[in-house]
């Protein structure tokens, strides 16, 4: 563990521990993966101003996201099938986030259910909603999130259809996964992973299986999801979702300033500048390149959050300097989870926290809530 210093170290360890089919699921973008790559690459084009001889004692990374106090403004993004990286993945990640003092967001497409996660956590977590054509299912899902006392609903708006990811198709990642001799051999070589899976109760897309009409197993889930993502979803739908939910609402997947203005008009509490980690519209701009114009377009009408390509505390600070009030990490915590379960997620958060703290200091600042564009060379 002592040799793990960066998110890349965790990624390399996860690559060794997690079967290729499931590691690739996390480490992939849609089509040519150009947007996936740009998310990370564009961060390196942004440079800090180095400031010296400023009192940098007694620093604070504490902030708020949608009014909730956070140990640092970094939440865990919703990621589907997280339980494939490590047995009970969502439950372990939620516990690690809770102990660290940052928000955890559970995906609609999680392996552990809302109720599973609620059982092993004490504080409220956030729930991410995909809107399906079967509205009764969606109403029920919102009600289950309310019953579990989730404190925010994250409505994902950039996935009315699922973009194609070549790696998943080539690896035979479907529901259920295609188990070729090659895949079985690959899984067999990773005893930590499969022994973990055998050692825990069998869970299967617990928000959906047994709750959606006709979905009783993985095979029926596959055909159900193929036809259920609602391609007719529109801005008008946000109103009934907001009303049914009745709590804090975050719109995730905004990448255009006109959409950001529309999002602010819905009365949602926050929007997330996001291209789904480069997993939807390949060829779209990187999240970080769009962030400044969205912040400028909406002003203080809605809180602006950010995700996509964050691999260090420096990246978090750059997004905050450009106007994000909070950020999310997806793959970094999945790598931590795949590498070593719950301690790996904690390690991810520790690495980012340490880098964020030191970078803040070297930029001559003490309080994360006071950072701004003046700290960058732009
Ligand atoms: C995702 N993302 C995602 N988003 C969402 O709203 N619901 C979901 O179920 C998923 N599932 C998912 C699975 C995997 C494996 C990944 C990598 C991502 C997108 C996610 O919330 C977030 O937008 C990106 O992961 C952010 O980019 P980084 O941090 O991974 O670069």
Image (cartoon, rainbow, N blue to C red):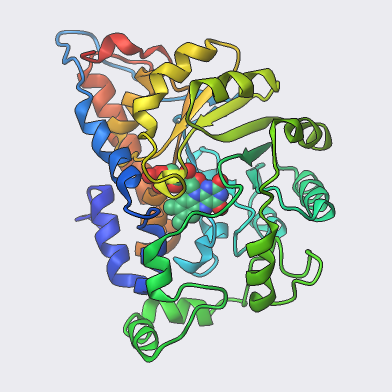
Q: What x and y, as percent, mark residue 129? A: 67, 46
Q: What x and y, as percent, mark residue 283? A: 36, 41
- Residue 154, image quadrant: top right
Work out whether 48 lies above or below 88: above
Work out whether 64 lies above or below 33: above
- Residue 293, image quadrant: top left
- Residue 284, image quadrant: top left
Task: Report the side of 10 relative to 168 (left or right).
Answer: left
Work out whether 25 lies above or below 60: below
Q: Quadrant of the C terminus?
A: top left
**Number of disc labels:** 0
Q: Quadrant of the N terminus?
A: bottom left
Closer to the camera, 49 or 131? 131
Residue at 72% of width from left, 58% of height from top? 115
Residue at 25% of width from left, 20% of height from top? 361
Closer to the camera, 158 or 56? 158
Residue at 47% of width from left, 19% of height from top? 294
Residue 229 visible at all: yes
Task: Report the side of 243 relative to 290 (left or right).
Answer: right
Q: What x and y, as percent, mark residue 78? A: 54, 48
Q: What x and y, as percent, mark residue 138? A: 78, 50
Residue 94 visible at all: no
Work out whether 212 lies above or below 173: above
């Amino acid at each position: 563990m002592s040799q793990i210093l960066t998110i890349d170290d965790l990624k390399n360890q996860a690559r060794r521990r997690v079967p290729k089919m499931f590691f690739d699921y996390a480490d992939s973008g849609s089509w040519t993966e150009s947007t996936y790559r740009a998310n990370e690459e564009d961060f390196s084009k942004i440079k800090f101003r180095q400031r010296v001889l400023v009192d940098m004692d007694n620093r604070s990374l504490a902030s708020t996201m949608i009014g909730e106090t956070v140990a640092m403004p970094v939440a865990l993004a919703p990621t589907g099938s997280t339980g494939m990286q490590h047995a009970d993945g969502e439950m372990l990640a939620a516990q690690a986030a809770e102990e660290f003092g940052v928000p955890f967001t559970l995906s609609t497409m999680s392996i552990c259910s809302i109720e599973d996660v609620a059982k092993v956590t004490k504080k409220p977590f956030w729930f991410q909603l995909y809107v399906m054509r079967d509205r009764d299912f969606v109403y029920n899902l919102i009600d289950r999130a309310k019953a579990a006392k989730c404190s925010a609903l994250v409505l994902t708006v950039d996935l009315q259809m699922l973009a194609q990811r070549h790696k998943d198709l080539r690896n035979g990642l479907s529901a259920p996964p295609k188990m070729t001799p090659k895949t079985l051999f690959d899984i067999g070589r990773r005893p930590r992973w499969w022994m973990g899976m055998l050692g825990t109760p069998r869970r299967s897309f617990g928000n959906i299986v047994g709750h959606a009409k006709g979905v009783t197993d993985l095979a029926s889930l596959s055909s159900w999801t193929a036809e259920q993502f609602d391609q007719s979803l529109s801005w008008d739908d946000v109103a009934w979702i907001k009303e049914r939910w009745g709590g804090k609402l975050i719109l995730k997947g905004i990448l255009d300033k006109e959409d950001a203005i529309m999002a602010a008009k819905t009365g949602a509490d926050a929007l997330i500048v996001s291209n789904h980690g480069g997993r939807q519209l390949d060829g779209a701009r990187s999240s970080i390149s769009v962030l400044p114009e969205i912040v400028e377009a909406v002003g203080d009408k809605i809180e602006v959050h950010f995700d996509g390509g964050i691999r260090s505390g420096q990246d978090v600070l750059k997004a905050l300097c450009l106007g994000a009030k909070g950020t999310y990490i997806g793959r970094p915590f999945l790598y931590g989870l795949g590498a070593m379960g719950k301690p790996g997620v904690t390690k991810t958060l520790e690495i980012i926290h340490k880098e964020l703290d030191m970078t803040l200091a070297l930029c001559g600042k003490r309080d994360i809530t006071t950072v701004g564009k003046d700290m960058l060379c732009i």
